Amino acid sequence: MIDMLVKLYALGDDEAAVAGVLLRRALAPERRPVLAWVEHRFGGGWAGECEAAFARTPTGCLLALRERAVLGFAVWDVTARGFFGPIGVDAGERGGGIGAALLLAGLRAMRAEGYAYAIIGGVGPADFFVRTAGAVPIPDSTPGIYAGLIKPDA
């Protein structure tokens, strides 16, 4: 899966709002329930990356919430500095703009932290990142930083 590059300085400032959904940084006391939510829906690898986001203050984890229930998450600066992701939305909530809102809010947070570019590593749905953030493929980036990961049961 290819890596992609986003010019953070070229992002607009318009917030991508989704009715009834609150986007905010996760707080340290939310670590365990958020990690359980991520692992249940997306597996241990993504939960591990999300856990790394809780190691910094403020956290590098955004949540999408409706009435205090988690609908989605996005993290950055976890596997490598300047990397955005993973990002995930509950299967029942996909297609409603939550992913786009999380992506743009996370990329803007990276820009506010001083980054000019963000790398999205091991991209699955490339069209989403192109359409939403103007991401472009990084040539020769496969298999990328995730090459040679240990097997979970090894």
Image (cartoon, rainbow, N blue to C red):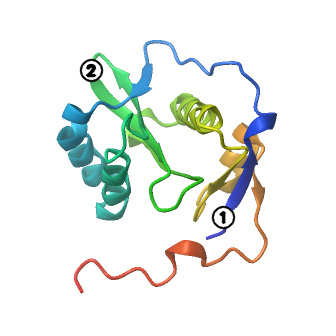
Indicate which disc residue 68 carries.
Answer: 2
SS of the residue under disc 2: loop
Residue drawn at point x = 59 percent, y = 39 percent: 110
- Image x and y of residue 99, in percent: 54, 36
Residue drawn at point x = 36 percent, y = 24 percent: 65
Rendering quarter of residue 34:
top left
Earlier in the chain: of badge 2 and badge 1, it is 1
The relative height of residue 143 versus residue 51 in the rendered view (above or below) is below
Q: Residues within 10 Å of mark 2 (few under 14, many from 20)?
A: few
- Image x and y of residue 52, in percent: 35, 53
What amino acid does circle 2 point to? Arg
The relative height of residue 140 versus residue 99 in the rendered view (above or below) is below
- Image x and y of residue 127, in percent: 71, 51
Indicate which disc residue 23 carries.
Answer: none
Residue drawn at point x = 63 percent, y = 19 percent: 15
What amino acid does circle 1 point to? Asp
Q: Residues within 10 Å of mark 1 (few under 14, many from 20)?
A: many
SS of the residue under disc 1: loop
Rendering quarter of residue 45:
bottom left
Q: Which is more toward the observer, 53 or 3?
A: 53
CA distance for labels 2 and 1: 33 Å
Image quadrant in which the C terminus is located: bottom left
The residue beneath circle 1 is: 3
Q: Which is more toward the observer, 125 or 68?
A: 68
Horizontal relation, residue 111 to residue 131: left or right: left
Q: Which is more toward the observer, 140 or 83?
A: 83
Image label count: 2
Residue drawn at point x = 27 percent, y = 54 percent: 39
Q: Which is more toward the observer, 50 or 60?
A: 60
